[in-house]
Image (cartoon, grey):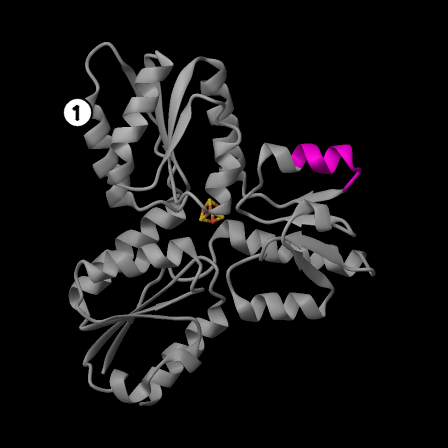
Amino acid sequence: MEIIVGKKSGFCAGVRNTITQAEKELENNANGLDCLGEIIHNKQVIESLNKKGLHIIDSIEQAKNKVIIRAHGISKQVYTYAKENNIKLIDLTCPKVLLIHKQVQEFAENNYFIFLLGVKDHPETIGTYSFCGDNSYVIENTDDISNALNALNSSNLKNVLIISQTTFSVSLFEKIVDMISNALDESFNLHIEKSICDATNLRQAEANEISKKADLMIIIGGQNSSNTKKLVDVSKNNCKNVLHIQTIDDLNLDFVKKFDKIGIMAGASTPSDIIEEVVSTLQSI
Ligand code: SF4
């Protein structure tokens, strides 16, 4: 059995920084800290931080301690609520996400209509959208384009920005950009901001390459991790057998044994020890 492990698998810089900083902050806050939403989409990491005093809260109204803001970022309304209620934030939003917040605000102030490409219910998209102003529309897939163009036309704006969630699918971004470019006549001024993060870009490109060679792809990452789901989608384009697992416990070894060439990729919130455990178990078969 040949095993190909993607070099870009696992923690991105933003997630690594979030975990490192959260651990440091927990050492300095004996009463524990709150975190708005799961700090990363990984059960094992969350359980380990829980033991060190991290409490996950679902909304800012539940805050009882200082609140960690994870790499995905938060909405304008959450910043305002925290300020008005003297809730201290430890803002670990990834700098790349903060840059997008700044960019959309500036474009909105300059009378641009904003098409934000992203998964509608993803926290990063919700956060970024809150900075886009009224003249904006979230596009999750090509089915949304017609309504998005109607919203643009109703606004009477002629400047248009296309920007995306940092973990959006590279191929879907290009497809949507093409469709919108073709739909707009010369009276529109279209600006495209390629805001998909390099870590996402490289990981999707690597999953694409490995899945062309492998007869089974194993993608490791949280079931609700957006960037992991993209790796599954990319792999399915080239490989008939794609498994999405969270840990080695989800793997049916009798099934896996049938394959000669296995590709492994992992999402941005998968710790290296979980990847190593899968690899070493496969090597031992
Ligand atoms: S995927 Fe990119 S933008 Fe998102 S947290 Fe990681 S480094 Fe930051």
Q: Residue at x 52, y 28 (%)?
A: 131
Q: Quadrant of the C terminus?
A: bottom left
**Count of marks overlaid on the render:** 1
Q: Amino acid at mark 1?
A: Asn
* Image position, residue 86 (x, y; %): 80, 38
The range drawn in magenta is 79-87
Residue 112 rendering spot, x and y as whole percentages = 40, 17
Position of residue 240 relative to residue 201, above or below, is below
Seen at 33% across and 50% down, the residue is 202
Work out whether 90 lies above or below 150.
Answer: below
Magenta segment main secondary structure = helix
User: Along the line of sight, which residue is nearer the eye, 268 or 4?
Assistant: 268
Residue beneath the point at 35% across and 58% down: 229
Of residues 135 and 70, the one drawn nearer to the viewer in this rendering:
135
Of residues 31 and 81, the one drawn nearer to the viewer in this rendering? 81
SS category of the residue bearing label 1: helix
Quarter of the image where one finds residue 136: top left
Residue at image point 66% right, 65% down:
49
> With 239 as the anchor, is 53 left or right in this view?
right
Instruction: In the rendered view, tell whether residue 254 sits above or below residue 144.
Output: below
Q: Residues within 10 Å of mark 1 (few under 14, many from 20)?
A: few
